Image (spheres, rainbow, N blue to C red):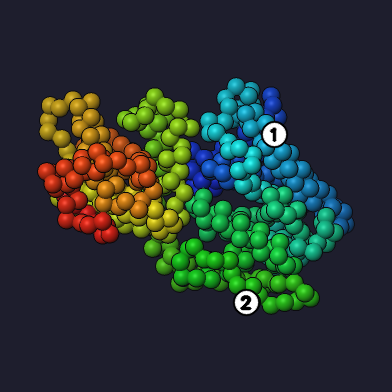
Amino acid sequence: MSLNKSEEKLSDLSRKTFLSMWSYENPFYELGKELCDVLVVFGNDIIIISDKLNHFGDHSDVKVNWKRWYKNAVSASARQLRGARNHIKNFPEKVFVDAKVSSPLPLKLPHPSLMRIHLLAVANGCDDICETTSGRKSLTVDTRCKDGEELFSVGCFGSGEDFIHIISTPALDAMFDSFDTARDFIDYLVRKREALSSEDWVIHGEENLIAAYMTSQPGNRPFFVPTSIFPLEDGARTVHDGMWAAYLDSDQRSSRIRFWKKSYLIDQLVEDIADDYAAGRMVIGFEKPISYHEGAFRLLAGESRLSRQALAGAFHDIYNESTSSFWSVVSESLDDPRVHYLWLLYPQPPEGIALEQVESRLNMELAKYMLVAQNKFRHAKSIFGICLPNRDCRLTTRLYRVIDGEKWTDEMAKQAVHFEKTEGIFAHIDQVTIGAVR
């Protein structure tokens, strides 16, 4: 199906943020009938996006043009979003990734009672007229506004899971620029909805609210901006223009971008996992459907940008070590300290050993390291193991394992102690220290 430029851009941004395993463009619910423009299924969180590109028109009467544009770009998106939401809740088995409805959605949708649905309407086509009238290309979000009654202002559709985020192009760009992980993106949507549902707001360009959100704390996981920083004007919290432009030029943003650089190793790793599965290169569980693996890989994909930076930092701690032997490190998630990640780098194997033998050995080594780690960190509810070639290894084999840290037996404990004593695995660290071992 051909996409217009707006839909193509949205598709690229969605895959970058939510990654290919969880983001689907133009799904269908019946033969030739499109459900929405982008569907993101990330555990119990479901993001439904409708993108309507409607040019504002050249009618001399701006009010007439506005009403037509609002009807086609905003009201039509709201109808599509609510229809898609209702279909997903009532007929979760009838969501397909092709127009012929021959390929069901590969991921299993959660039970309707568990779904956390987020509705986004991308309203395009009025950037130029907004800039002419207000000096900025974005719409005003005014929670008191009803049905487009005020020029270049949109209100809030519904409450709770019926709440619809109406997003103009500059706000969309700012959202994906600032929140490029599923966790950070969803956190923002939830906190924004809670804030706008609790009192009246007038936001002169949502990108300015995003700037305030990003600068409210040093890290990238802030609480929602304290409302006290926004003045009360005519009974509404007011976000003025100019904050996003200032944030773009700020040292805080520049340093944050530099700081995050290593974190994109995690994004690439998750995409490599998807590629390995699609190409039949997955060593463990290759015969299972992607829905079998998705829950495990969502652990890694569910980390915030800040947590990914910490996890990538742990990887780099051992990346430059000697390449003649195995190196491993365990790191806990900054988002959920009960989730641990184990990196295991392997050396180039001796010549003449068949790849199947190498992969069998690596699988065994990864299992041993994870077992010892599970014994060391008994508070961990999950341990995600990642086995990769070191910088001098010519192989490309990657292995992944996830174990339930809460499942533990006396026999497993004996085996873990045995591997620690006989092979020195994590022998120099105790149950409360996280570190690397050769």
Q: Observer-nearest residue: 428 or 321?
A: 428
Is residue 252 shown above or below 43? below
Please identify the quarter of the rendering in which residue 185 is found.
bottom right
Assign the N terminus to one quadrant of the image. top right
Q: Observer-nearest residue: 313 or 136?
A: 313
Residue corresponding to mark 1: 90
Instruction: Give residue 125's position: percent from left, percent from top.
Output: 71, 51
Neighbour tally class for label 2: few under 14, some 14-19, many 20 plus, Cα within 10 Å: few
Disc 1 on helix, strand or loop?
A: helix
Instruction: Give residue 226's position: percent from left, percent from top.
Output: 60, 72
Q: Is residue 329 among what the camera can see?
A: yes
Please tell me which residue is depicted at 51% across the width and 50% down the height of the picture: 182
Residue corresponding to mark 2: 229
Disc 2 on helix, strand or loop?
A: helix
State the count of labels: 2
Instruction: Give residue 391's position: percent from left, percent from top.
Output: 22, 46
Q: In the image, is 37 to the left or to the right of 332?
A: right
Please identify the quarter of the rendering in which residue 408 is found.
top left
The three-letter amino acid code for the residue at tag 2 is Ile
Q: Observer-nearest residue: 392 or 105?
A: 105
Is residue 284 shown above or below 305? above
Please tell me which residue is depicted at 30% across the width and 52% down the height of the picture: 377
Please identify the quarter of the rendering in which residue 269 is found.
top left
Please tell me which residue is depicted at 58% across the width and 38% down the height of the picture: 110
Instruction: Give residue 158's position: percent from left, percent from top.
Output: 75, 53
- As measured in the structure, the alpha-carbon distance from the residue carrying label 1 to the one carrying label 2 is 42 Å
Mark sitting earlier along the chain (1/2)? 1
Neighbour tally class for label 1: few under 14, some 14-19, many 20 plus, Cα within 10 Å: few
Please tell me which residue is depicted at 13% across the width and 46% down the height of the picture: 421
Q: In the image, is 416 to the left or to the right of 216?
A: left
Q: Is residue 69 among what the camera can see?
A: no
The three-letter amino acid code for the residue at tag 1 is Asn
